[in-house]
Amino acid sequence: MTAVATAKIELACRRWLEDWVIGHNLCPFAKQPLVAGRVSFSVVSTESNDWLSQFIDWLLFLAEHPAIETALYIAPELDDFEQYLGVVEQFEQVLDLGGWRGQFQLATFHPEYLFADTEEDDPSHFTNRSPYPMFHLLREQSLTEALATYRHPERIPERNIEKMQQLGAEHCARALKNYKTD
């Protein structure tokens, strides 16, 4: 992938975070670290398909750089949702077996994201859809602190689903497509 293509993908994901996630208040905790410059964006690739080694490198990097609050690892080549979910499952095992659980949390976003037991055309999927496949690593401590200052954080997912249903699947799909660069 060329440097120009990488920069375009990173910019598209940054715009999505600013306009979609923060603009629709899908994550009430996203704005502060972005404004403070504490969000890392990285477009990643692996020719050997060795995502586990990369994930461990990401964890080690974040552990060594506490100024980075949260990191988005954008993986354009994981466009197949089932393959992506397989990688996510492996990452979750690394968090558990490697003793990283409690230090970091993994959030997932994908252009084809589907919640289990939900109709395929349900707008709720857009709460976790992004222009490109990505892995979001968050610091547990930061998340715990943010949740402590927010009234009724348990209502965030249901509020987000309601927002997507108000916008409608067609609107959400058009908006998401506008972030993607080809």
Image (spheres, helix red, strand yellow):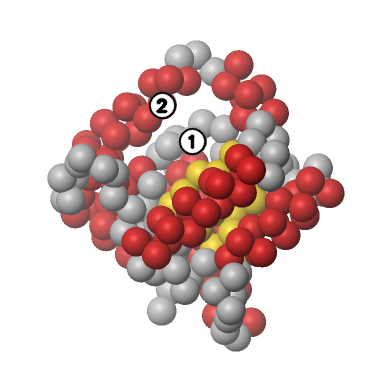
Q: Quadrant of the N terminus?
A: bottom right
Q: Could you tell me if residue 4 is visible in this image?
A: no
Picture layout, residue 31 above or below residue 77: above
The percent position of residue 30, horizontal first and vertical second, equals: 57, 39
In primary-sequence order, the first of circles 2 and 1 is 1
- Please tell me how crowded label 1 is: few (under 14), some (14-19), or many (20+) other residues with Cα within 10 Å: some
- Please tell me how crowded label 2 is: few (under 14), some (14-19), or many (20+) other residues with Cα within 10 Å: some
Picture layout, residue 65 above or below residue 2: above
Residue visible at 35% across and 33% down in the picture: 160
Q: Could you tell me if residue 106 is visible in this image?
A: yes
Residue extending furthest toward the top = 151
Where residue 72 sits, quadrant-wise, is bottom right
Indicate the secondary structure of the residue bearing disc 2.
helix
Q: Please indicate whether residue 106 sits to the left or right of residue 141 in the image.
A: left
Q: Mark number for residue 55?
A: none
- Give the alpha-carbon distance from disc 2 to disc 1, as whole Å: 8 Å
The percent position of residue 22, horizontal first and vertical second, equals: 49, 41
Q: How many marks?
A: 2
Residue visible at 27% across and 60% down in the picture: 174
Residue extending furthest toward the right = 64
Q: Which residue is mark 2?
A: 156
Q: Mark number for residue 27?
A: 1
Which amino acid lies under the numbered mark 2 shown in the image of this protein? Ile
The percent position of residue 45, horizontal first and vertical second, equals: 58, 74
